[in-house]
Amino acid sequence: MRVREVEGMDPEISGVKKPKNEEERQRMLDAARALLAVDTTAIRQNPESVEATLERLREVHREVAGGRRSEPGVPWYRRHPVLLAGSLAGAAALVLGLVIFLVIGTGPPSDPLGTLLSEKGRISVVTEAGLVETAGEGGAIEVFSGSVVETRSDSRAILFLESGSEVRLDSSTSVGVENAGEDTLAADLYRGNAYHRIAEGDDYVLAVDGLQVSGSGCAFNTDLGPGEVTAITVFGTTTVVDEMEETVCRQGRKVVAERPFGTARLPVTDVLDVEISTPWFGWNLERDEEGGFDPGALADEPAYPAPDETELPAETPADETGERQRPVEPVTRQPSAALSGVPGPLENTLTWSLDSIPAGSEAVLLKSQSGACTYPEDQYAVLGPETSFADGNVRGGQAYCYRVAVVSSGTVVALSNQEDLAVPLWSDASLQATLEGGAARLAWSWRANFEVTQIALVRSGDGTAPEYPPASGGQRAWLLTPGASSLRDDSIQQGVTYRYRAFLLSGLIVAGGSNEGEVVAQPGRPE
Amino acid sequence: VEHSEDAQERIERLAVLAGEDVDAFTELYRFYQPRIFRYVLSRVGIAADAEDITAATFEKALRNIERFDPKRAKFFTWLYQIASNTATDYLRKHKRVKVGVEDIGEAFGGNGLVSDIDVENYVTTVQLLQELPRSYQEVLALRYFEGLSVGDIAEVLAVSRGNVSTRLYRGLKAMGVVMKERETAAAGKYHARQRG
């Protein structure tokens, strides 16, 4: 599918420097537009040459496939003495394996590395084999080596490792975990923000886009942002290694690796005194206290509201029963934004509400296909006084995420929840079949919200319903370019009823189809 | 080249069968041949040579199909990787020739779907691309002509996503500069004619 948008350059180019001035930005946009203006879909290799190449490739196939098979007449062990030795060794190993199996039995295929528990919202685990398991709030999933654990935009989770360590995942976070042998656990932070509480004696190495953070008996937080990677050592000591050097970080230090060109394989650029004052750390502080862990640097910070508390209404005053004793403090309302969205085949409808927005600020709609929306990279539209927006720039089968950011003097003062909307495939196709001088004439038209790469016109002459790929020997298919809109079928036989249907193909997928058209070829006149 | 999971699964299955089953290989060839040809043409700019490179790409893929590992790469990124390497080898061996309409026109011929303006537009853009370093050419063609995601391009070129983003960014920047230079040169010629 061609890239359709150039606004903001290209949504996939991330983590790079901004153009140094408007003129440079404009020139880059012109270049992107020039590339996108070229219609390459009409380019075709000469059909004769395509077929000639295929013929040659079929010969190569025979040669290659034949080479893999044994030549007749010569025993295989004469031609492949190494294979003979290997086979004998393999047979011996099999026998040995069988003996071991019979004597000591077999254990489970592998032990789980830990359990992922949802603290809030839905979570998922993608296994090495590509299977996906999900769980709702309070649910747990066993995690095996090679899996990727994930939270969504509105969820939060804790991965309890068998070794006693914990990895806490903020919203929209993905972490891969793998047993790297010799009791070493290798983790990868693919996106988002995660807090790692590593048990004493545990060997844990986290890779985060070019940086490696490791430690034992420590706690650290890693955040993979669009412009930088940060690693904050919350408790104990960690070692941060990049391509250039190794940095030992004591408690309360933050390492920043800038990614101005989208690559984190850059030297660590800064080591700062830590400044942590977010609900995320507040929640981790609570978890540390509950777990009896040393909160380290977090304990020195002022009390934070837990993430959930920020979303809850203010506590009601104590009633007469005296059960609720918490004093009521004056509440300063923070700016906030809430977004909801409904996907549609032709447009996504977004509705938002803003609260306590400071004067002079503006609301910006963020849109991305990367799974996470960030400001300013994913700016899509500046929102006016209205409270809804219909985004018609969508394609079927694609998923988009949206957020509303309230920006004041270049700083985000409020960020809404993220809405992930998947646009369903939609098409409307109609076909007409008529008899025209002993031939069938087929004409069709279609509209679709996805890229149609080919039209498959299928004819059935044996009473079966036309299907693509053709389901029976009595069916025939024509593969046509999307621009084709009619076809004359001269190959019909008199007296036979033919049923036709046009299918819209997107790549190899049948993504839509027309109604059926029917013609009955006139029976031949009696001799 | 975005596929649904079903299509992706089907392609990987075909790729696994392709070594033994000629029909599976034929299906893959028919599906990917137009895309590979289109990509190679944008790299080398001469239709006849693009045909040879496309054929060589599929032959290499066929001879090495057992090395394709669906766990490590998608089939189409593996195929684009072979095409990219084959085109790069070709460009190393051949002196750079300025591409003209006649070299590319035949790739548009026969289907009657495009106007001369489309062909000229394509040629002009390929000429612009050819003035850029090869590392920029390949990412720009894969991204904007072929529509590959940054992640897939990274797989094709065996580099990091960050590296692809950087090349795209710098490629667009360099192409913008070349376009500006052309505009300036054209304006200079125009004014010289006016004065003359």
Image: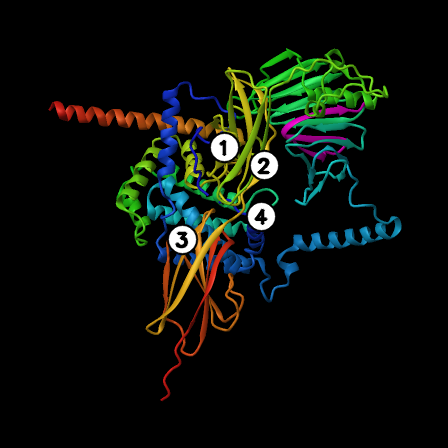
Q: Do circles 3 and 2 both sit on a common chain?
A: yes
| Side of A112 where A48 appears, left or right | left
Amino acid type indicated by mark 4: Glu
Relative image position of residue A278 (x, y in whole percent): 67, 18
The picture quadrant where one finds residue A485 is bottom left
Q: Chain of mark 4?
A: B
Q: Nearer the viewer, residue A355 or A226?
A: A355
Q: Which mark, residue B40?
A: none
Q: Earlier in the sequence, mark 3 or mark 1?
A: 1
Look at the image and tell me whether residue B95 can be seen: no
Q: Is residue A232 above or below residue B94?
A: above
Does dot 3 land on a helix, a strand or a loop?
loop
Q: Residue at x 53, y 58 (%)?
A: B24
Amino acid type indicated by mark 1: Glu
Of circles 4 and 2, the one toward us is 2
Residue ID for mark 4: B5
Q: Do circles 2 and 1 both sit on a common chain?
A: yes
* Distance from Cα at disc 2 to Cα at disc 1: 17 Å
Relative image position of residue A265 (x, y in whole percent): 57, 24
User: Callout 4: 10 Å neighbours few (<14), some, many (20+)?
Assistant: few
Residue ID for mark 2: A420
User: Is the stretch drawn in magenta largely helix, strand or loop?
Assistant: strand
**Outermost residue, left direction?**
B196
Of circles 3 and 2, the one toward us is 2
Q: Earlier in the sequence, mark 2 or mark 1?
A: 1
Q: Chain of mark 2?
A: A
* Distance from Cα at disc 3 to Cα at disc 1: 28 Å
Q: Which mark, residue A12?
A: 1
Residue ID for mark 3: A482
